[in-house]
Image (cartoon, helix red, strand yellow):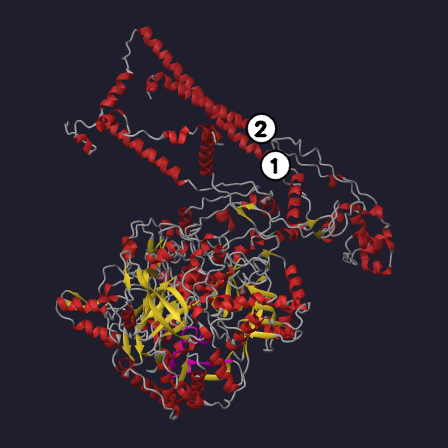
Amino acid sequence: MKKVGNHTSFSRILLFCLAFSLSFSITSYAQDAAAPAAAPAADAAAAAPAEGAGDPVKGKELFNTLCAACHKLDAKSTGPALRGVADKHDRAWIYKWVANSSAMIKAGDPAAVKLFAENNNAVMTAFPQLSTGDIDNILAYTSLPIEKPAGGAVASVGGGASQDGGMSNNLVLGLLVLVLAVLIVMLVMVTKTLKKVAEVKGLELPETSSVSFWKAYAKNQFLVLVTVILLMLASSYFLYGYLMQVGVDKDYQPIQPIHFSHKIHAGDNGIDCKYCHSSARVSKTSGIPSLNVCMNCHKNISEFQGDKDSTYVEHSKEFYSGEIKKLYDAVGWDATAQKYTGKQKPVKWVRIHNLPDFVYFNHSQHVSVAGVECQTCHGPVETFEVMKQHSPLTMGWCINCHRETDVKVEGNDYYKKIHDELAKKYGVVKLTAANMGGTECGKCHY
Amino acid sequence: MASNKKYWQSVEELNENSSIVETLRNNEFVEEIPTDEFLGDKEALESSSTSRRDFLKYVGFSTAAASLAACEGPVIKSIPYVVQPEEIIPGVADYYATTMNDGFDFANILIKTREGRPIKVENNVLAGAKFSANARVHASVLSLYDSMRLKQPVIAGKPASWEEVNAKVKAGLASAGAGQVVVLTGTTASPSTDKLIAEFGAKYPGFKHVVYDAVSSSEALDAFQAVYGDRALADYDFGKADVILSVGADFLGDWQGGGFDKGYAAGRVPKQGKMSKHIQIEANMSLSGASADKRIPLTVTEQKYALVAIYNAITGAGVSVPAIANKAYAEAVAKAAQQVKAAGSAGVVVTGLDDVNAQLLVIAINNALQSAAFNPAGARLVRKGNAKAVAQLVADMKAGSVHTLIMNGVNPVYTLPNSADFVEGLKKVKLSVSFSLKEDETASITTIAAAAPHYLESWGDVSVAKGYYAVTQPTIRPLFNTKQFQDALLAWSGNAQDYYTYLKASAVATGKTWNQLVHDGVAISEVAPVSAGAADFAGAAANLAASKASGKLELVLYTKTGMGDGQQANNPWLQEFPDPITRVSWDNYVTVAKADAEKLGLENWNVANGGLNGSYVSIDVNGKKLENVPVIIQPGQAVGTIGLALGYGRKEGMKKEMTVGVNAYTLYNGLNSFQSATLTKEAGEHEFACVQLQKTLMGRGDIVKETTLKDFNEKDASEWNIMPVVSYDHKEVPAASIDLWESFDRTTGHHFNLSIDLNACTGCGACVIACHAENNVPVVGKSEIRRSRDMHWLRIDRYYSHEETFAGDVTLKEGTSGLMNSISTFNAMEDPSENPQVVFQPVMCQHCNHAPCETVCPVAATSHGRQGQNHMAYNRCVGTRYCANNCPYKVRRFNWFLYNKNSEFDYHMNDDLGRMVLNPDVNVRSRGVMEKCSFCIQMTQATILKAKREGRTVNKDEFQSACSEACSSGAMVFGDVNSKEDPIVALKEDDRAYHLLSQIGTQPNVFYHVKVRNT
């Protein structure tokens, strides 16, 4: 405190602060600039020339609608990998096989029998509706060479158009700071010039004694009292704020045993939250889905395909595929043999939302009855690469919502009578959860 | 303010020349500190592995670790199923219908499971569910999680595998030769098991299946067999009787399998001015005696005379019988007999006398009456034990003719009176196998202790009575390496089937498919009427009349509501369950009449901490002595008789805290509950854990309101259900019209009320245990109970009258005048009568609309909900206990200690297994907070949520609390008074409804119904 005596230092400090903030904004700007932005990968498929009689573009469409449920291009699924299948078998044989494979097996075609045995005796659906042209198209698609990662997502160039907005904002801010700095420098210079002028003119400047100021201040008991009270109020405000955040785990984002990306599942693929968290409809817990739910889809999706329109820059394709392997390990799925091994290793997820034992919370009340969106409490989960606690989960947060949210009474006979009576009583058309008794202690604490 | 006061520190300082003062001035201690003692021994110091530096390192590390641990929140793991079973949704309860059958208790029940764990027993209410759950059945779910259970088979004290057991038994059976192979079981009541045992035994010559009931009904079975040919027990429906006369039968207790209270209570609630009349002749004060309109305490011998007299009066026979000594009682018996006779087919007589003649007479009487309540066609099959066969078996064993003995669900070493003979015989048996839940007294000395699964882990079928068929299904995977007796028997008889397949194949045809049968748990079928055969009733009466008193005290052995036959003695809920009559928990004791106690110098007294103490006696029955038995002076105990409960005093396979009481089975000679005994006073005093010290109502007729059927029918309700008045503005006005508080508006939404009918309540205590299970109520142990720190959210108060009747008490109280008269009268009124009237009153939080507790809570931890509940937020409570002090009903319970995960309270909440019974929807309370009945808000909330999800209004009797759900007699009804169709509305507007202590204006949401006595 004592060092603050020198007035001239004030301007210096101000200047320093400005310089500091300026430099900070510059560094952050620099970071932004350095951040890589994936260049749109060239669509190799579109560029590839048509081969043979088939049209690979049409073939891709057919492949995705009819074949992809059981076949992949480069990996074994229910059926074998199909890339290059045209080279393995005779065309006529393939036409026959696609039209009705089981007849061929019955007839004892040696290639067909062998293929059948290789694939766990899984019968392929017959596609008599496919013309030879269609099959040619599909074969053209499956004969395309493996795409090389164009340009390399690893060495992608930064600074996409999407970051332009951020940059210009920074520019404006930087300019503002610069202008302010110039102004301050000018002020200082003006003061100096004035002083010089005064010196030259021989004017006597009144002495401003800093020491006397502090002494005067100390002598003024009223001022001291006011300052002390203000200080105490301020410190208790901050202390209260500090204490109130103890045990509040907002933004808790633990590392999970399997890197599960809600962004990929709920965001990019648009899977409904309640497809996996189905018990949220009927139970107090939303439930971490059991692994058999994962396997509904992941039996066929053994590799991360990525999405060419978006960019997965944080993790590589191999990383995501590795995480799917972890799932297979846990559930005991042998992807090559397409069989469950029976060796299960339950996944020990780290629980993120931890309500204390003395709070009763029921998901079904909020999800099924009130129709609250999952995002209301859990945040934009579909954008979360790593799941975190979005809301503070404090009692104040609960109560606020209960006070502000209208009860969804439409179409629910339970509420009809109670709503009519209460609406008359309170003279309002809409009722909040609090009006219904949603802020009573015993409703959540028992 | 300077002072020259000199402060002196010891008397020595006053003496100026004291050397000590001088020494003290120089040294801090008068004597040298003996540092040498612990630092001087250089050798010891150097040999210590912990150096000073190490010590400081440890201190530093642990401090750092502790502070680090304190900074980080704990990481909680969540482990979902790998493959989730279809029927399990985490957080949603599943219910399975099953049947309890442990040879003593039978019940058709539903098991509530959460995440695959059974957590609560509820009643099956489908047609065909004959037996409701009693307190022991409700507690049986905790016995599943008993940490002392046998976890794998044991051969000769060493853990073994089932393969080894099978090999050993098969080898043993193969070498049986001419030696007897005997299967000893309790009453199985299971058609498939009986068939299986017969098939198993067919191979062995001289095979026997001996059925042994620890608590025997052998004589009643013999009598029924003599008349009807079947080894069974007549069934009774007391709802069809207008006059019920019981001679020593505690039919509201465990008499002949129990489960009569539902029918009984139905007839006891006055409807259209009519209710049944119940006369009880008995020695011990029993639940039935407590509920009776007229109770006649007689010795056992006199009960026999009374029964003959009744027989004479009803059938018109002229068997000469000695008179009952007490004139008044003799007249009362004669009057009762006339009343039964007058009732004709609406009368019924039952007896609990363990005497074939007495049992024969009852059959004769009921047939003479053509009693509608008496139902020999639908005979009960829950008792099959044969005392003679058991005696023969012990003799055979001692003679060495038994080669193999396979036991299931019995513990004869503990329960047999001649257990020493049995143990001796067991030594001569080549191969003995005991299927048991525990390494109990028997299993610990047999060759093989076979770990049996709990009934909640087993398959089975039960036919509790003719025409009733029920299925037992597992509700959880076996917790331990156990095998069912039936499965083992199949394996040993070379049948490759498992018992489930066998059961399915041999299930009795009921018209239901197997899946439907398992789903329902019960099925009923028509029964053919039976006709009585001939028997020498007159001879039986003559024999009975010829019985002579021994001149000694007559000991009546009985089973307590909490403990039954003692199978569940390691169940802390049952140990802590206060006996409905004596209100003593954690003990058995000899009950003595006041007159006899005075003769022998026996006493009960209260000590300063509120505990009840009593004298010790030793009981001598034919030279067999039971020492250090504590004494309770029991009002209503017939003079010349004493009572003692079976089922206590177990030592093996028990936690130390649970090994309480004395083993009365040692006195159970000939498996007969009546013995002649002598009492000798012993030195010392016993410390009881009794939860109620005041015995009488002191004439406060407004707490338990009573009236007679005559007044009830003839007078206006305002005369017998008097509403209290208070003085307001110098005028008497109804207490309900005066209010200190502003009223809540409760016209909208739900408003919960609980109705308790004192006429229907038999004091059975099923609600107490159900409340324990539902609300995670902790067990606190004997010494805490003794300090009145019991945690029961629901207590059943029991009051005796000081005069012969409660009405007499009120008259006496109102007749007092003057200070001296009042003091002496009130002092006298603290003692109950020799033969008092008894009343039960369940009391839980009354959920006052104007609650005194709420106004005094400094932190607003207890507050009012608009649904009528008085909420208690545990996390908000700071433990001032103001609320408990301000509660006029004394229903708040304080957590003086942490009762979970605390080795000082080594009950179920202290081990991982026992904690599996906890209800995940209810908070487990911590130390220092107040708790109380919540009106099962978790249940009402769940009901509301279910209705909301289904988009409908709540059905009229959908709301339940744990106690009302458990109440099989219909005494407790829970509901929403704002819903017009709900049955509670009519109950609340009934003339009999009143509030407890309504004069203090608390406006409770619990109301009682005036008790009406049919005198």
Q: Is residue B725 visible?
A: no
Percent x, y for residue B645? 40, 69
Quadrant in the rendering for residue B710: bottom left
Q: Nearer the viewer, residue A238 or B697?
A: B697
**Residue type at numbered disc 1:** Glu
Measured in 3D between alpha carbons, the distance from the residue under mark 1 to the one under mark 2, in whole angstroms, is: 17 Å
| Residue position for label 1 | A314
**Residue type at numbered disc 2:** Ala
Residue drawn at 42 percent across, 17 percent down? A185
Q: Nearer the viewer, residue B648 or A369?
A: B648
Image: B995 above or below A255: below
Q: Is residue A204 visible?
A: yes
**Circle 2 — which element?**
helix
| Residue position for label 2 | A33
Percent x, y for residue B599? 27, 71
Numbered range of the magenta stretch: B232-259
To which chain does the residue with label 1 belong? Answer: A
Quarter of the C terminus of chain B within the rendering: bottom left
Magenta span contains residue B267: no
Circle 1 crowding by C-alpha within 10 Å: few under 14, some 14–19, many from 20 = few
Which numbered circle lies on residue A201? none
Percent x, y for residue B428? 58, 67
Quarter of the N terminus of chain B within the rendering: top left
**Circle 1 — which element?**
loop
Quadrant in the rendering for residue B638: bottom left
